[in-house]
Amino acid sequence: MPALSSAQARRVYDRIGRAQDWQRFYEDAATSELVARGGFDTAHAVVELGCGTARFATALLAQHLPQDATYLGIDLSPRMVALASDRLAPWPERATVSLVDGEAGTPVVDGAADRFVANYVFDLLGPDATRAALADARRVLAPGGLLCAAGITHGDAGLARSVSRAWMGVWSRWPALVGGCRPIRLADALGPEQWDVRHHTTVVAWGVTSEVLIATRR
């Protein structure tokens, strides 16, 4: 089963809407690890690929980013962009949300960001789209900037392994039921010639295993 196309993913996430926030029961443990390791307290320009409802961005702006830091979230779902824009309304001069088509790169000039965030996005993408997104992250990041990513990965044992196998089985038959996402190992896609991995771990919440990865471009 191939990954969802951009058009298919757009339809899925337009339909999911606010229900995406229900995924916090397994996402929050991983994104908390990402925040703890990502040095967001010293970040000044954050770009988020696949911002969804902006739940993560709201927490960054309210609790972790410096007062002068800016945030740009992009998403291919018009409904997600609308929800994110509403949620980020308290920061009109610092936060922007843009609709993209899923094919063109991030609408940011080269080297303009010091954090490139992708939470539960790479596990939606196919190999070609993953390579393109990673190349775009390298373009967008300033020297010393960090790629900060979290996503579904394979469980190693016990309940976590059973859950990831069941998840993969559902994805192979009805990918829309799991938002098009499936267990992957993002670390395998980061070539050592392009990326220096600074932190890589897995977090299990309610039997769902997530990969947390922080890397800087070489």
Image (cartoon, helix red, strand yellow):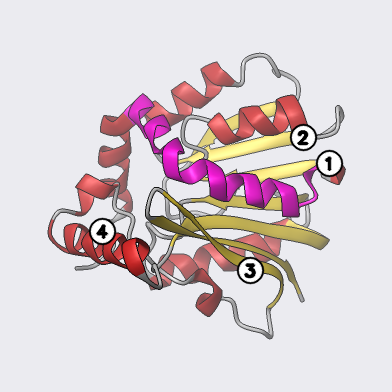
Mark 3 in CB contact with mark 1 (< 8 angstroms): no
Q: Residue at (58%, 57%) from the top-left corner?
A: 149
Mark 2 in CB contact with mark 3 (< 8 angstroms): no
Give amino acid for label 4.
Trp
Q: Quadrant of the N terminus?
A: bottom left
Q: Disc 2 to disc 3, how far (Cα)?
A: 21 Å
The reply, left or right, for residue 12 in relation to residue 186 is left
Mark 2 is surrounded, within 10 Å at the Cα level, by few (under 14), some (14 to 19) or many (20 or more) other residues, namely some
- Give the number of the mark in front: 4 or 1: 4
Q: Disc 1 to disc 2, how far (Cα)?
A: 5 Å
Q: Disc 3 to disc 4, how far (Cα)?
A: 22 Å
Residue picked out by circle 2: 64
Magenta segment includes 144: no
Is the residue 124 above or below the residue 56 in the image? below
The reply, left or right, for residue 91 in relation to residue 188 is right
Numbered mark located on residue 200 in the image: 3
Mark 4 is surrounded, within 10 Å at the Cα level, by few (under 14), some (14 to 19) or many (20 or more) other residues, namely many
Secondary element at tag 2: helix
Q: Position of residue 64 (x, y in %)?
A: 77, 34
Q: Position of residue 123 (x, y in %)?
A: 41, 60
Q: Quadrant of the C terminus?
A: bottom right
Residue picked out by circle 4: 167
